[in-house]
Image (cartoon, rainbow, N blue to C red):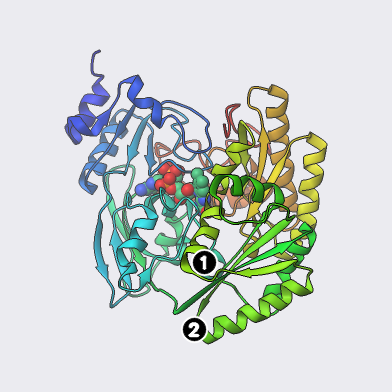
């Protein structure tokens, strides 16, 4: 097979082992966790910032799109080569460059896996707070691009609250640095602008993050309910009592049974819902808060509040929650994960609405979510071999997103917009808001070669979820 000119130049910019271009080698890079598929023309694995810059210059000469990629766990199709082009995988740039414990900072390459950073500093009593459920696989570069959150978002915020500076390669190959390591740099907050830009403004090649001290005490509670409504009502009641747990997660009965079969986490099989609540801080404060929360749960008819007695028990409870998406594979050939946000006070109303959607379309919907910050993940189950079910799953998703917006929320809490929800952006932004975003994108990405077709609406569709038939399977 003749090596195409584009590939020859990519090899010159890196080396032969750093470029994949044969069709059979590209198949793995056709999709991310959304499952919409489109093959790229090549995949490159640069090892340095200079190589990233050289690669984007080659792509620009060929007027070829460039798609940054971390671990490919993204759930909104951000790493899919929608218009073909060169996928730039940051997987080989996976070094922790510097750990500065005195100042609670780390400088890392984008391919470092999220959990590896916390493991690297755990013995010294530190950790990196944003903890997506995919943290064993997803990269910090992907987290920056998606502004990822996780169960501990409730107390500690999302990625943007923990990133202090970036090194970024722009689509013309120019390398810029944003932010600062120790102090708030004057001028425009370019770090804040790039975090969450889903790879459409630049390729992140270095990240400075904040490290946090591990808490003195951690307590994990499992509140068990016979009614979903009682569980959802408890969520707002806990924060109304002036307590902000480190994490406050909810799973409904359908999810509990699927998770239990997959991970044997010790979840009750006959419950309608559970709240997984984690408290962190000084020992006495944690004990007091645990008592107060147990009382609040009791007042909302929790059948039982279990407290994890040992670290292993706590880890097991979390393993169940973090493997929830995988566990659903036992129940259905295909599923579609939603990521909507609502004010937490509207949870009871929203869960009723989702139950109605479930009945209307005859599809099962499991609920597992970051309840404390109103970030829902309804999992719509269907069979992708059945065209009617696929259509119903997409309609159900659109209706759930529409309801989130109607209740004062948003179309995504943490999984990003990507190619899945860019046509829904007008639901939450005015034409003027979107025009400003387009102008800002032009400054960084004037030829629209970096990750085209993502985030901003194309204008060709209206208010529709844009996923392929194979979604979630
Ligand atoms: C089982 C499961 C559970 C999940 N749980 C959570 C969760 O709790 N919270 C959450 O927020 N997300 C969650 N996700 C979604 C996903 O893991 C996150 O969005 C994650 O941040 C993606 O990281 P990644 O390395 O896989 O990036 P990819 O999927 O490879 O890429 C994601 C986006 O980032 C861009 N990108 C990647 N690297 C760079 C870079 N260096 N520079 C510029 N752009 C880049 C890509 O172009 C793409 O647009 C989950 C996914 C799965 C499959």
Nearer to me, 209 or 51: 209
Q: Residue furthest bottom?
A: 284
250 left or right of 352? Answer: left
Relative to 81, say whether 252 is above or below. below
10 left or right of 457? Answer: left
Contact, mark 2 vs mark 1 (Cβ under 8 Å): no
Name the quarter where the N terminus is drawn.
Answer: top left
Q: Position of residue 8 (x, y in %)?
A: 21, 25
Total number of numbered discs in the rendering:
2
Nearer to me, 318 or 110: 318
Image quarter for residue 224?
bottom right
Look at the numbered disc 2 and give the secondary structure of its residue: loop
Q: Position of residue 391 (x, y in %)?
A: 70, 28
Image quarter for residue 96?
bottom left
Q: Is mark 1 within 8 Å of ligand 1?
A: no
Q: Position of residue 141 (x, y in %)?
A: 37, 51
Q: For the residue carrying disc 2, how many other residues have a C-alpha within 10 Å: few (<14), some (14-19), or many (20+)? A: few
373 left or right of 91? Answer: right
- Give the residue at mark 2: 282
- Give the residue at mark 1: 157
Earlier sequence position, callout 2 versus callout 1: 1
382 left or right of 88? Answer: right
Q: What residue do we see at 55% from left, 80% from top?
A: 286
Nearer to me, 89 or 95: 95
Q: What residue do we see at 68% from left, 34% from top?
A: 394
Q: What residue do we see at 79% from left, 60% from top?
A: 229
Relative to 142, say whether 17 is above or below. above
Relative to 2, say whether 382 is above or below. below
């Amino acid at each position: 097979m003749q090596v195409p000119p584009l590939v020859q130049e990519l090899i010159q910019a890196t080396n032969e082992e750093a470029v994949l271009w044969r069709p059979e080698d590209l198949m793995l890079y056709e999709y991310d966790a959304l499952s919409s598929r489109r093959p790229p023309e090549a995949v490159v694995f640069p090892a340095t910032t200079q190589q990233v810059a050289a690669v984007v210059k080659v792509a620009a000469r060929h007027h070829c799109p460039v798609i940054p990629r971390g671990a490919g766990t993204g759930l909104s199709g951000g790493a899919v080569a929608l218009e073909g082009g060169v996928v730039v995988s940051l997987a080989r740039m996976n070094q922790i460059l510097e750990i500065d414990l005195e100042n609670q900072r780390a400088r890392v390459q984008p391919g470092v896996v999220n959990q590896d950073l916390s493991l690297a500093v755990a013995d010294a009593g530190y950790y990196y707070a944003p903890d997506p459920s995919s943290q064993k696989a997803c990269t910090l570069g992907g987290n920056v691009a998606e502004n990822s959150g996780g169960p501990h978002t409730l107390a500690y915020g999302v990625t943007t609250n923990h990133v202090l500076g970036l090194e970024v390669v722009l689509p013309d190959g120019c390398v810029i640095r944003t932010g600062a390591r120790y102090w708030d740099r004057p001028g425009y907050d370019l770090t804040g602008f790039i975090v969450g830009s889903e790879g459409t403004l630049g390729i992140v090649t270095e990240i400075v993050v904040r490290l946090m001290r591990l808490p003195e005490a951690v307590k994990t509670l499992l509140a068990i309910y016979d009614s979903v409504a009682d569980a959802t009502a408890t969520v707002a009641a806990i924060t109304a009592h002036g307590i902000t747990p480190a994490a406050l997660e909810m799973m409904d009965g359908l999810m509990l049974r699927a998770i239990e079969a997959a991970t044997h986490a010790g979840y009750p099989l006959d419950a309608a819902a559970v709240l997984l609540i984690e408290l962190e801080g000084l020992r006495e404060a944690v004990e007091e808060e645990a008592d107060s929360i147990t009382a609040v749960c009791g007042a909302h008819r929790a059948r039982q509040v279990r407290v994890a007695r040992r670290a292993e028990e706590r880890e097991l409870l979390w393993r169940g929650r973090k493997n929830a998406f995988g566990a659903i594979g036992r129940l259905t050939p295909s599923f579609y994960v939603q990521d909507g946000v609502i004010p937490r006070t509207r949870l009871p109303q929203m869960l009723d609405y989702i139950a109605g959607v479930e009945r209307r379309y005859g599809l099962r919907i499991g609920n597992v979510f970051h309840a404390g910050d109103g970030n829902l993940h309804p999992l719509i189950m269907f069979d992708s071999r059945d065209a009617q079910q696929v259509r119903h799953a997409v309609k159900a998703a659109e209706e759930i997103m529409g309801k989130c917006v109607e209740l004062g929320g948003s179309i995504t809490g943490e999984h990003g917009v990507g190619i899945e929800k860019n046509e829904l952006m007008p639901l939450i932004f005015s034409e003027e808001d979107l025009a400003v975003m387009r102008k800002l994108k032009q400054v960084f990405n004037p030829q629209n070669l970096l990750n085209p077709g993502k985030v901003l609406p194309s204008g060709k569709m209206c208010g529709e979820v844009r996923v392929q038939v194979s979604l979630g399977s």
